[in-house]
Image (tube, rainbow, N blue to C red):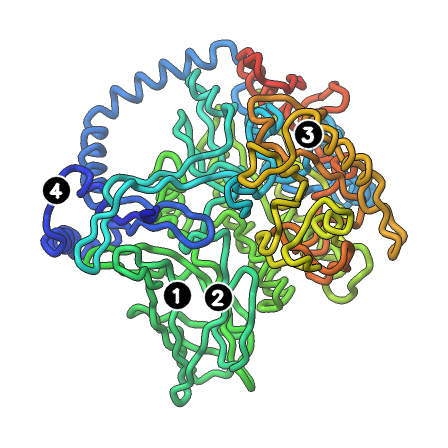
Amino acid sequence: MTSPRASACTGVVRRGYQLPLLLLLAALALLTQGRDEAVTFAYTGPGAGFAFLGSFLSLLAGFVVSFFSLLVWPFRMAWRAARRRKGFRDARVRRIIFLGLDGLDPGLTDRFLAEGKLPNLARLRDQGSYHRLRTTFPSLSPVAWSTFATGVSPARHNIFDFLNRNLKSYVPELASSKVHGPRRIWKVGRWRIPLGRPFVEMKRKSQTFWKLLGDHFIGSTILRVPITFPPEKFNGRVLSAMSTPDLKGTQGSFSQFTTRIGKASYEQGSRYPLRRDGATLEGAIEGPDNTMVEGEAPMLIPFRLAPNGKPGTYTLEVQDERHALAAGEYSPWVPLKFRAAPGIQVRGVARFRITETSPEFSLYMTPINIDPENPALPISHPSYYATYLAKLLGAFATVGMAEDTWALNEGVIDEKAFLEQAWLIQEEREKMFLNALERSRQGVVACVFDTSDRVQHMFYRYLDGRATGEFANTIPDLYQRMDRLVGQVMPFLDDQTVFFVLSDHGFCSFRRGINLNTWLLQNGYLSLRDDASESGPYFQGVDWTRTRAYTVGLGGLYVNQKGREASGIVRAGPEAEELKRELAGKLSGLRDTEANGIAITKSWIAGDLYQGPYLDAAPDLIIGYGEGYRTSWDAAVGKVSASVFEDNAKAWSGDHCVDPHLVPGVLFCNRRVTAENPGIEDMAPTALELFGLQPPEWMEGKALL
């Protein structure tokens, strides 16, 4: 099997330039002398399998296209103005603003409104309306925001969870995107050159409302709305969000450099040694694998840390640049260039923070983000939009889940460091959003802020009383900061602008984890080889010839169906349906006798919840966990652990992967919303109707205004 990894030489080889490799590299080196940043190295990282595409020839073509575009610019502007006038001919408004505050909970919102802590949301409520907003089944961000974008249920947009299972291997894989590699690899000595282009497939189906608006010459600016990677082409602008990988191809892998000798095992990061050389410290940053050479070893960037005379302050020396570091403070974004071959490189950015200086020394590095100024793969549409934002506003986080929750979970950074990082990312997003509001006086401006979700995930233990101390007011402060953001939008409103503030779901406590794989084992639905009582992750040790059901991901349970799963044993039809109903009945109302709680309020058969062309890809059962419960960390990755129930000891202490009735979102609007029980699927048809377009029949939502 050939690797799905690709190099920057892809475009050259594909066009028939069958040059000897050394001549090819020499030509690239000459063409890119002094412009190394123009050529990007294409690869697929170990975690998500994304192809990084680019070449000097594509850059050259871009210059030609830009020159031609400059010549015809006056004619294009006149043509676009005429089309825009036609598009807005039947519009009831000139602009819609969507401010997404991921995870904003109606219960907490009500509480803080009553306490007078949210004056801007109170003003919006009083002038317009405020409702709870129905979320999706399951109540997960990728599912809900996909429904927001398309106006349809999961069975029609094909996103049911963060993770899917591979039907051949049962191994979890990212639900939203998939890489398709080149058919052949050209091998010349130790070098590897793909013949043909890989591409990244967007697995979300249906059409977004901004695509439909763009087809009618109504432009949109879509900033960081989840499940927009890879970015779709449409008449507007989009900056990708959730599922955008880091430079190593994972969904965010931090690095810890330390003088500590002991080994450490991190679920979403790595520990690397720091060597002392007198007063200085030396290490190496591990980047993506170099897929251009045999063995595909990771590319490394050496660095040095030298004290600069003041206690707790150091100079980071990396790639002929110097950056001042102070203990307990984040560096600005530091550019990193990984060179794969002469003239071929991939660029990223990362922040650094010294976390301890004595007696041991430790340095934390964020996941290496794709450099927005020189993106190694498309993270925006048009492709230059990310570069434009970086040039205008400075470097910014690009990885899908930018707030490093796993570094806090693993104790590599503390609460203070996590919060500072979250607010830095929030400030970056606010600048983009306000810039879009200033420059887009008509059409749609939509931006989703993740900080409200990430902070509640990590600090809910302070809200529910499991933790005390200086961070007790973190979540109330978070809601007040979101309210101030709403206040910043108010000056942009007029009688031709409709403003929605919404969340995709609410929040509740996560105190206990449930491993349904263990429950299935104990109740005779799942079997392990050699009659073991536990298994490794990714279903290591599962005997599929005797397993009728299993779980993976955060919201569902699957039947091991014959003809669908590679080793399925349950016949489709009456046998599978009977098993689904049997499991749904037994799991609904499942009690945790040790903690005296209702662990699962109800289990639904997916076919009873929704219908659509992608129903076969859905989990067979959607699990509605009770308040305080969620699937365990082990069950999410296909592991059978010793106990069905266990305490959640991680900093990640709040969640929403529960019964959707427990965690509705919020909906504020500066207009009166009279519809009863609005749902997140209603937002897409509402946007279309406000601009005078009839929503297509396949949209399941209904216009609210």
Residue depicted at x 62% and y 68%: 411
Give the vertical position of 592 relative to 313 (above or below): above
Query: What's the distance in space between the residues labelled 3 and 2, CA to CA?
Result: 40 Å
Please name the amino acid that badge 4 sits on.
Tyr
**Residue 17: mark in rendering:** 4
Location of mark 3 (residue):
606
Give the vertical position of 328 relative to 151 (above or below): below
Q: Earlier along the polypeptide chain: callout 3 or callout 2?
A: 2
Neighbor class of circle 4 (other Cα within 10 Å; few <14, some 14-19, many 20+) is few
Foreground mark, 1 or 3, reads 3
**Residue 274: mark in rendering:** none
Residue depicted at x 46% and y 24%: 211
Foreground mark, 4 or 2, reads 4
Give the vertical position of 647 relative to 31 (above or below): below
Q: Earlier along the polypeptide chain: callout 1 or callout 4?
A: 4
Instruction: State how many labels appear.
Output: 4
Location of mark 1 (residue):
286
- x, y percent for residue 12: 18, 42
- x, y percent for residue 504: 65, 36
